[in-house]
Image: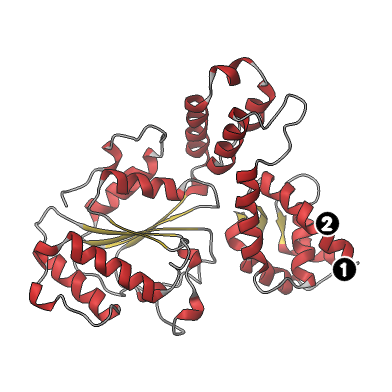
Amino acid sequence: MNSLSFSALVKSENFVGRDFVFSAIDNFLHRYPKGYFTIVGVPGSGKSTILDQLVLQNPDIIYYHAQFPGKNRVEEFFTDVCTQLITKFQSCLNRENLHFDNYDSSVFSLLLQQISERLSLESKLIIIIDGLEAINLADQAIGTNLFHLPRYLPDKVYFIFARRPYKKSHTGLLIEAPSQVLDLSDFQRENREDVKEFIRKKRTTETQSSQRNIIDLIDDEDNFMYVQQVLTAFAEGFYDENDVNNFPLGLESYYQQHWEKMQGDGFSDVAVNVLWVLTVGEMQPMSALTISQEINVDVFDVMEVIEMLLEFMQEFRTDKETKYQLYHHGFRLWLRGCLQGIVQVRE
């Protein structure tokens, strides 16, 4: 693989902006001889699309998506990624040692080392893993890295991750290599400008001349999934001028996936009450203490729920306190509808 300059890539037809992300990745790759780079963002913020763009323009990148069905287990990861490495980097591998009974962490490390030693000076091996939050931790021994990823990396080997928000003390990774985290929430202005550009590209003559309230509805958004689903539904005639508050089928399905993951094996009364408070009224951030006072439970119980659901939250830190809110107003409204029946049954 040749030396990469992601910021200079030609964008695909439906892709806009994100130059600040590509520049950060490009700088990391040129600054460090190896390392781990992580993109963090709430659902719908465009993480997967960014990674797709990197793979589209650089076919030698090894790509793995842990959220695909059956892909969240370590055995499947090693089988898939080792097979890709052998296929794409045959010229860098010792062919006498390419017959394995099974793929595991030792085989993975062996392949990384061999490729690293034989790559040209300007080349890099880049492995992308999307959806780190989907990895099945029950499938791994306690204390091991996510997917048993290596603590130490050979030179010229880089991992690029995308994951939803997580508790910083629970990265799931113990590494001794250069690392950098880019949190998309730290770039609100850039995100909003990119979404506006996306809207400008997707707007048809019809959306410019009629049903203007649809455009007004999304014109100040910074969530790509929400905007894309609304624009698609509008183009298909889902909305009319008098009703812009329904949820398109694609968005309903996306939110349903969130809801199923949030529930896990079942919700406690505390979890239901915490979410109920977060869906009431206007979408304003609330501290764990305020929520605990609202529902009359211990603040530590509230924090346990918030940490469990952190990937669906936005976190706002000040010198005095940290506040939380659900990641998007559309999901908040949809979730309130789901919770109403549960709350009524438990009252």
Residue on which the image places disc 1: 346
Apparent side of residue 202 relative to residue 275 in the rendered image (left or right): left
Residue farthest toward the bottom in the current orientation of the protein: 141
Q: Residue at x 39, y 75 (%)?
A: 74
Q: Which mark is residue 340?
A: 2
Residue 30 screen position, x and y as percent: 22, 51
Residue 308 screen position, x and y as percent: 62, 69
Circle 1: is it few (<14), some (14-19), or many (20+) Cα within 10 Å? few
Q: Residue at x 27, y 80 (%)?
A: 102
Residue 294 screen position, x and y as percent: 84, 62
Q: Earlier in the sequence, mark 2 or mark 1?
A: 2
Q: Looking at the rendering, in which quadrant would you find the C terminus?
A: bottom right
Mark 2 → mark 1, Cα distance in angstroms: 10 Å
Mark 2: amino acid: Gln
Mark 1: amino acid: Arg
Can you tell which quarter of the image residue 210 is in? top right
Circle 2: is it few (<14), some (14-19), or many (20+) Cα within 10 Å? few
Give the structural element (helix, strand or loop) at label 1: helix
Q: Is residue 37 above or below residue 222?
A: below
The residue closer to the viewer here, 168 or 251, is 251
Is residue 84 visible in the rendered image? The answer is yes
